[in-house]
Image: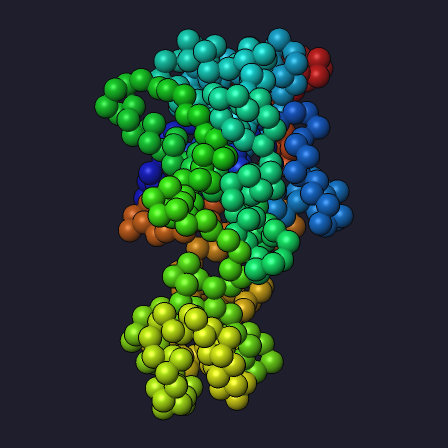
């Protein structure tokens, strides 16, 4: 029998949609929480993301499944008073409510923090929004791209002189989702001491700045303005960058003297570089970055990026060739860690990422596939004490 996970027995009423909020509740769900996903009767738009017409037609877009596995689906028309009463009834027995609407939307529906905490003082109510529930911009819409642009990420991403560049995935959504999961976990732990619930107000902009703490301090403390530096590491070492190798590319992460020694020895250019005063120390190497690049890439051209990756890492010079997603998920290390899980679905066994850590006992797992729209409506309502006739009436009146 599987051991209990950290959030076993925790009930989450999840109104979140798209990515940041669903990622947060997914992280808690695979660690044991019972997550009931509340959707409008036609389902959220993210079910039909347009990358795959086939999966969108099923209302089961792969990216949607990735953050909704393990949840139960309840459909409600929140514009109807009967639906609001259902939410209140469920919230009375819930531990957590999560939502990512603009501030004020849940209040106008009658299911905001004040209304639900009055029913259940132990309730933890997590709200994820672009700018939080305070401040002059609290009612502004928050999207990943907007937060990437505002946070400074795009100003420092890309090559010098190029246009600003956003990250290759919705990084601010994911950072905000992880922050929300951390906030809920913190509130749940605090409740064990105080017995009281509370509101967890998550701002996407705040979350992103928290993860950019080093870059913020570079400015606030040192007066250094971050600028675009391409693929160079934040260490600003000339050998921590992207280089051509064979027919591909190699990202070197050579950041100290020991690693530098391993690099130049394995490449067979140690004597050449030692004889050149331009490369005598890290400051000179940085001043003569392009000249050093020329020497390194000439040596790297002698073999493939894949072979150099193996040879240099074994020698103690950290590096990696450029992997696509389909390659990295088959990597020996990824397989050994077991953090991708296969799930049995109506369309066969599908594979999904879980989380980034292993617990010695009660580790994360996906208990069920992402739910079809409304698949658990009757089940959830019956558990809340609704009879079969009541459920039938709610369905006849288009409440569920």
The percent position of residue 346, horizontal first and vertical second, equals 64, 47
User: Residue 375: which quarter of the image?
Assistant: top right
User: Residue 187: which quarter of the image?
Assistant: top left
Q: Name the residue at 71% across, 49% down.
A: 51
User: Residue 107: which quarter of the image?
Assistant: top right
Q: Nearer the viewer, residue 30 or 318?
A: 318
The percent position of residue 399, horizontal first and vertical second, equals 66, 16
Q: Name the residue at 50% across, 53% down.
A: 227
The percent position of residue 248, horizontal first and vertical second, equals 58, 76
Q: Is residue 72 left or right of residue 282?
A: right
Quarter of the image containing the C terminus? Answer: top right
Q: Name the residue at 58% across, 65% down.
A: 324
The percent position of residue 27, horizontal first and vertical second, equals 45, 41
Q: Nearer the viewer, residue 29 or 244?
A: 244
Q: Residue furthest left?
A: 193
Above or below — where is 135 with respect to 183? above
Tell me, what colour scheme is on the image? rainbow
Residue 46 visible? The answer is yes
Q: Is residue 137 left or right of residue 10?
A: right
Q: Nearer the viewer, residue 380 or 248?
A: 248
Q: Is residue 254 left or right of residue 386?
A: left
């Amino acid at each position: 029998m599987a051991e209990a996970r950290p959030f076993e027995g925790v009930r989450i009423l999840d109104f979140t949609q798209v990515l940041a909020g669903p990622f947060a509740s997914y992280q808690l769900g695979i660690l044991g929480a019972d997550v009931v996903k509340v959707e409008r009767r036609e389902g959220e738009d993210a079910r039909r993301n347009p990358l795959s017409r086939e999966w969108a037609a099923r209302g089961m877009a792969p990216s949607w499944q990735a953050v909704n596995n393990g949840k139960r689906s309840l459909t409600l028309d929140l514009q109807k008073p009967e639906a609001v009463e259902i939410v209140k009834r469920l919230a009375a027995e819930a531990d957590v409510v999560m939502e990512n609407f603009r501030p004020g939307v849940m209040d106008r529906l009658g299911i905001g923090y004040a209304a639900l905490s009055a029913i259940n003082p132990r309730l933890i109510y997590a709200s994820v929004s672009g700018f939080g529930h305070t401040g002059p911009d609290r009612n502004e819409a928050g999207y990943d791209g907007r937060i990437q642009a505002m946070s400074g990420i795009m100003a420092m991403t890309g090559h010098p002189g190029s246009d600003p560049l956003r990250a290759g995935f919705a990084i601010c959504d994911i950072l905000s989702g992880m922050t929300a999961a951390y906030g809920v976990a913190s509130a749940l732990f605090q409740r064990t001491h105080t017995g009281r619930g509370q509101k967890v107000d998550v701002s996407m902009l705040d979350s992103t700045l928290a993860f950019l703490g080093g870059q913020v301090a570079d400015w606030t403390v040192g007066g250094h303005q971050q600028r675009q530096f391409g693929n160079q590491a934040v260490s600003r070492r000339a050998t921590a960058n992207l280089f051509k190798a064979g027919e591909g590319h190699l990202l070197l992460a050579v950041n100290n003297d020991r690693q530098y020694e391993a690099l130049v020895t394995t490449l067979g250019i140690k004597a050449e570089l030692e004889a050149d005063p331009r490369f005598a120390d890290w400051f000179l190497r940085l001043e003569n970055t392009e000249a050093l690049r020329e020497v390194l890439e000439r040596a790297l051209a002698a073999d493939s990026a894949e072979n150099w990756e193996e040879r240099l890492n074994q020698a103690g010079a950290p590096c990696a060739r450029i992997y696509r997603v389909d390659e990295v998920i088959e990597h020996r290390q990824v397989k050994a860690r077991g953090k991708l899980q296969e799930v049995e679905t109506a369309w066969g066994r599908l594979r999904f990422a879980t989380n980034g850590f292993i617990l010695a006992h009660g580790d994360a797992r996906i208990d069920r596939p992402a739910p079809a729209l409304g698949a658990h409506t009757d089940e959830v309502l019956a558990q809340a004490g609704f009879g079969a006739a009541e459920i039938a009436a709610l369905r006849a009146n288009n409440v569920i």
